[in-house]
Image: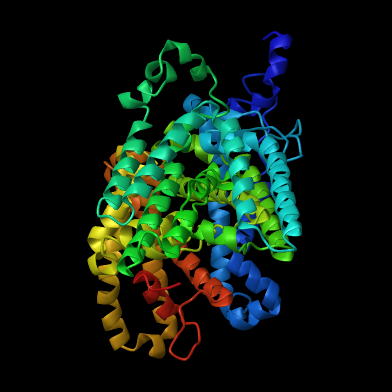
Amino acid sequence: KPSSCREHCVFTRAWFPCASSVDALGYPCAAPRTSAIMIRCHVYFNLAFLLETEFLTALRTKGLRGLQRETRLLKLEFFPIAAAAVWIGTFFEARIPELRQRCFEAPACVVHLRQRSAWLWPLEPQPESNEFAFFDGADIQWREFRGALPLMLPAAVLLTLVVRCVLALSARVRGGVHSPAAAVSVRLLVGVGFVGFLHGSGLLFLAALLLAFFASGRALAGTRFAAPCAWLLALAAIAAKEGKWPVRRLLKFRYILGQDWAWLDAYRGEYEWESSVNLLVLKLLSFALDSHASAKELLAAGHAPSTIAWANHRQRYSLSRCVAHSFYAPLFIAGPTITFDDFADQLETPRAMTGEPLAWYGAQLAMAMLMLEVACCTVPCFALSRSGVLGTLEPSLGAPAVLGTLNIMWLKFLVIWRVARCWALADGIDPPENMRRCVNNHYSVASFWKSWHVSFNKWLVRYIYVPLGGKDRRVLATFATFLFVAYWHDVEAKLLAWGGLNALFIALESVATPALQKPILALGLPTRHPFLYRLLCAGGGAFVIILLMAGNMIGYSFGLSGAEALLGSAASPAARAEILGVAGFVFWCLSVGALIMFEVRDFDGTYAQGPKGKASPAIAVAADLSGKSQ
């Protein structure tokens, strides 16, 4: 009640439910403008496709005339589907104010909402409106990354200028010729300094892990013990950093070196070094396994250890290059993951984009950051999920909440990975693009995992899936791959369930697609009834999208307990009837979305090609589901 106390609560007035015309703090209730929320959501769902590199490139090249000529999106015949999409969007967006209110009314949810800091979004909330009165800070990863951006962005610019200046000076000394040795040395020094600033004395633990991989990989390269030893080291390192197991508590200098060295434990840097072990393990495994494969090729070709070929091998897989790759500053915090051989090739011959393409990529990143900031100030999806409120929502509210959570989750990862990739491109290294597609542009489990966290997917295919047999032993290789992914992320039941579900979905998809494809093609639906065939493809895509949403929400949102709560809410006949009604409505909504996806894929040229070279949605769906599309 004292005004000296209440003045500190101004920013939180919107978090208290209104029982009358004033809230618990005595301020007038100000409902968010639903029309403004709808406008922002409609703008988001249109701009999200511009974050796809292929779609933006096609739009810049072909223009709106190309969009009208090559797709049905701007044609009168497509108007009913477009109108349905707009109505569906409006229906979901109209539920956002109620979702906000549910979070405001739940103490476990509202505790995650924070006073919005305006460093990225310049408009302060107005006294008569609570539209932007909060920031959803429930997601720890994004909250910390967002908080570090004001320091990280200037540091990235400074370190990039240092690298570029050193490389330019070395090339000038060599008469304009690029110097791989200078590229290795400057990135090694910058990387070690960057990791030392991040983790303080924890750098020594990471360096010890690196030396263990390097020594074993160098000594065992070309032998049958190299790969097993590297994998055992990797699995042990991931297990050792887990806080729930006793090994991590013993990784202290006072336990290892004695009390005289306990002062090192106090110098922890900005972040705990254990948080970087997972990504570092991927890089070290890549070094060890690439070195082993190269040594096997030399042995198979009959080269003696004293030949030039082996000398080149030792130079390529040297300790300095291993450190430069493992501690490479732009990609150290969150990736994308780049294999050692790819990194070493780019040290010799840089191929990163420059000039206008890099400027367009930066513009996409700036737009994505703005979209994510507005989303976190509009819908408290992270707070609803983390607090468990999401699992208590009725289906009519749960469906838009799940859709919103997946979209904001996608935006979060896209921004984090593109900040890192943009820094690496400016530095002269071109890592894989992790998010090739908008989250709302997927209708196949297999193609989804080819476009989500692409660099990790390529790493898994190269080092796990193919060595275990690939397509010849698809079920075994797929289950082993997702089991490692779940173990690598965190040793939790919900992630193990997520890995098993995705492996099961891919296995079912690979079996069901050919079985359904044969009778449909035998009836000649693609040629006799193309619209009906497109509707069938859209229905199949909608079913797959529901599976993807369910699996990823279990793994990365409400977990097994939340899924159990949702199933428990369907105990009564009335609840089951509501769930079936909402499921049917969601299926229809996603089918409409799939029809739009087909047109977008036609325009950007990422469909599989038909027999006469013309993009065919039918063939594309079949190709995507069988894992053969690009």
Q: Residue furthest front?
A: 306
Q: 534 or 311: nearer the eye?
A: 311
* Nearer to the camera, 517 or 103: 517
Task: Name the colour scheme.
Answer: rainbow
Residue at 47% x, 91% y is 612
Q: Which residue is at the front of the view, 555 or 489?
A: 489
Left or right, 389 with reference to 374: left
Is residue 187 toward the left or the right of residue 107 in the image? right
As drawn, the residue found furthest toward the top would be: 2
Q: Quadrant of residue 518?
A: bottom left
- Using the image as rendered, state which of residue 145 and residue 420 is in the foreground: 420
Camera sees residue 491: no
Identify the image quadrant of the N terminus: top right
**Corner quadrant of residue 188:** top right
Figure check: 199 above or below 457: above
Residue 192 x %, y %: 57, 38
For the point 64% across and 52% down, the residue is 182
Numbered circles on residues, count: 0
Image quadrant holding the C terminus, namely bottom left
Residue 340 point in image, percent of width and height: 47, 55
The answer to whether residue 177 is above or below residue 35 is below
The answer to whether residue 251 is left or right of residue 110 is left
Left/right placement of residue 127 relative to residue 34 reads right
Kindly identify the residue that appears in the image at 56 percent across and 51 percent down: 414
Q: Is residue 156 above or below residue 585?
A: above
Q: Position of residue 326 (x, y in %)?
A: 50, 45
